[in-house]
Amino acid sequence: MNKAIWNVKEIADIFSIFHDGWVEDIYYSDPNLKLKIGIPYLAKAIAQGASGFEVSLEAIKDFRFRSWTNEAERTPVIIENTKDILSLQLEILRGDVVDGSVRVLCQTHVSEHLSTGGYLFIEAKSATVEAENGALVSIEELRETSSAYWNAWEAKNKHSQ
């Protein structure tokens, strides 16, 4: 099974699967970018003792954060510097496709920065996901593992009510 993800919808799905995860680090080497994503519940289900994944994005054409606006901010703030984006402590909520690019809905956890969140825009040719043990993980494996986790979580919480 091929582990590379070429379809923009499936690249966006990576970020929806990583719901509640956070961006721990960003590595940029023109034209490629790697995001280290912390998401322990899903990582442990893929690789024993793991706490996250590395998403490698190839041939980046766009990578920027656009803040939401609030009453004090008349226009959104655009951040393109990876160190500045990392400093926002982004929590991933979901990914979708807008105008052919990936748009990741995020919350920020640094009160002195901007509003409480915004969108991370990503345009890349392809993506791969790697577990902490170095194994490449397919989008299908991510979907199946995430679905199994949330189904078990739902069943457990139904019985505890």
Image (cartoon, rainbow, N blue to C red):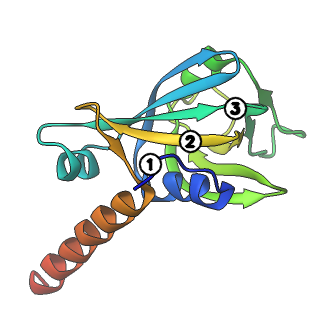
Q: Amino acid at mark 3?
A: Leu
Residue 100, relative to residue 116: is it above or below?
below
| Helix, strand or loop status at disc 3 | loop
Q: Quarter of the image for the N terminus: give it.
A: bottom left
Q: Residue at x 28, y 62 (%)?
A: 145
Depth check: 119 or 131 in front?
Answer: 131
Sequence-first tag of 3 and 1? 1
Q: Is residue 30 visible?
A: yes
The label on residue 12 is none
Residue at mark 3: 114
Sequence-first tag of 2 and 1? 1
Q: Residue at x 43, y 52 (%)?
A: 18
Mark 3 to mark 1 CA distance (whole Å): 37 Å
Q: Give neighbour class at mark 1: few <14, some 14-19, many 20+ (Cα, 10 Å).
A: some
Q: Is residue 136 left or right of residue 98?
A: left
Q: Give neighbour class at mark 2: few <14, some 14-19, many 20+ (Cα, 10 Å).
A: many
Residue 79, relative to residue 45: is it above or below?
above
Q: Is residue 6 left or right of residue 156?
A: right
Depth check: 157 or 104 in front?
Answer: 104
Toward which corner of the image does residue 124 lie, by quadrant?
A: top right
| Helix, strand or loop status at disc 1 | loop
Percent across and percent down for residue 63 are: 72, 32
Residue at mark 2: 127
Q: Give neighbour class at mark 3: few <14, some 14-19, many 20+ (Cα, 10 Å).
A: some
Toward which corner of the image does residue 117 lie, by quadrant?
A: top right
Q: Amino acid at mark 1?
A: Lys
Q: Residue at x 64, y 19 (%)?
A: 82
Q: Of discs 3 and 1, which sits in the foreground?
A: 1
Mark 2 to mark 1 CA distance (whole Å): 9 Å
Percent across and percent down for residue 100 are: 80, 55
